Image (tube, grey):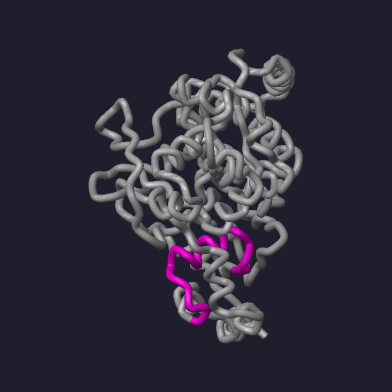
Amino acid sequence: MTVAEAACIDTASTMAVGTAARELQLKRGEFAIAVHMGLVRVLVQGGGRPRVRKEEVDRLRSQDGFPEALRERVHTVGTAEGARLLGISPDRFTKLARAGCLTPITFYLNRYRAVVWLYLAQELVEFAARQSQLLVGKSPAWVRSRLEGGADFRARNWRSRRIERLLSFMEDPWARAAVLAGTLDPVQLAEVVDDLYERAYLARIRPEPVFGPTGSPSAREAMGRLMQADEPDEMLWRRVGLIMELDNAREARPAPRPGDEWCPGIELGPGFERGQESELVPVTEPEPASVSEPVQVFSPDPAFGPVPASEPAPTFVPVRDSDPDRDPATDPAPAPTSAPEAALGLLARIGLRRRASRRPCR
């Protein structure tokens, strides 16, 4: 059997993501969230668009409570609807989100190009049951301290959540490095990855949207800017992570260069599958599932449109939403210190080792 015949047979047992979304009675944004959360497994064939096996669709359709149960798990709300769900005012909801108590799952740009954050309704309900003391009375001192300092952890926590999720899907070290490379601006990336062929390879295998590169240029631009670390300590954290992943990737295999006759595939993590000659399974931030009251934050550079304001808090605060024991009420306010000394020492040691073994670019 030829590769083409095998591909045709496999295509006959799969369906496009748009068709799968309709079969599962999900909107495009809801389907993308389901893929991002690992509720729906997808595969890619020959570097083409992702597809979904019919068996996977049948499995989801046979679950109890379909489709309401599945749609409930991916239902998102904005500030106004989220505040009603928690029984608080939109102003208090925004303060809790800015203080880092609530982590967005996605965002969209309204007609004024302002960022509108969306949250999983199910997570808000769980938060209300777990942290009911934050919904009534006076806010704790650590919340007031963060807000008085002008903190806004929405973009940072969304970015941390998305990066963690993408890394959990990737087993190949080059794919993991590509995820972290997207968190640095071009200047910083060139400082960490001085080989232009490696930078080109990281850019080529970077995750793409499930439904392809859809969306307006301003939305794609906002996504790119929101994915980049914007505080010194977070930048250092991402640089250290990228250096470590690069060391692992270089030990596994070199990046492809002009004249190479092979181009290795990408190993995927649990929940994702490989089709014929498959490459990286793309994961995306979904399109908005609903339109809610906008929360506008503006960039100091109008040319780039509104993006979340920079955070004055100098300490990196990663949020692991998968950890049910996390208690924001007991989290101390960020310490007014610079980047952790341990990270600085690690960066220095790795940098010295990399300079000693650096391979010249050809």
Asked if residue 55 is positioned above or below residue 156 in the image, the reply reads below
Is 299 one of the magenta-colored residues? no
Q: Residue at x 47, y 58 (%)?
A: 76
Q: Residue at x 58, y 28 (%)?
A: 140
Q: Is residue 221 visible?
A: no
Residue 300 coordinates in the image, percent (x, y): 31, 25
Name the foreground residue: 208 vs 254.
208
23 to the left or right of 317: left
Residue 254 coordinates in the image, percent (x, y): 67, 41
Name the foreground residue: 205 vs 224.
224
Residue 274 coordinates in the image, percent (x, y): 66, 67
Residue 121 coordinates in the image, percent (x, y): 52, 57
* Stretch of the chain drawn in magenta: 23-42
Q: Quadrant of the N terminus?
A: bottom right
Is 39 one of the magenta-colored residues? yes
Q: Is residue 334 visible?
A: yes
Name the foreground residue: 59 vs 133.
133
Where on the picture, by quarter, is residue 103? top right
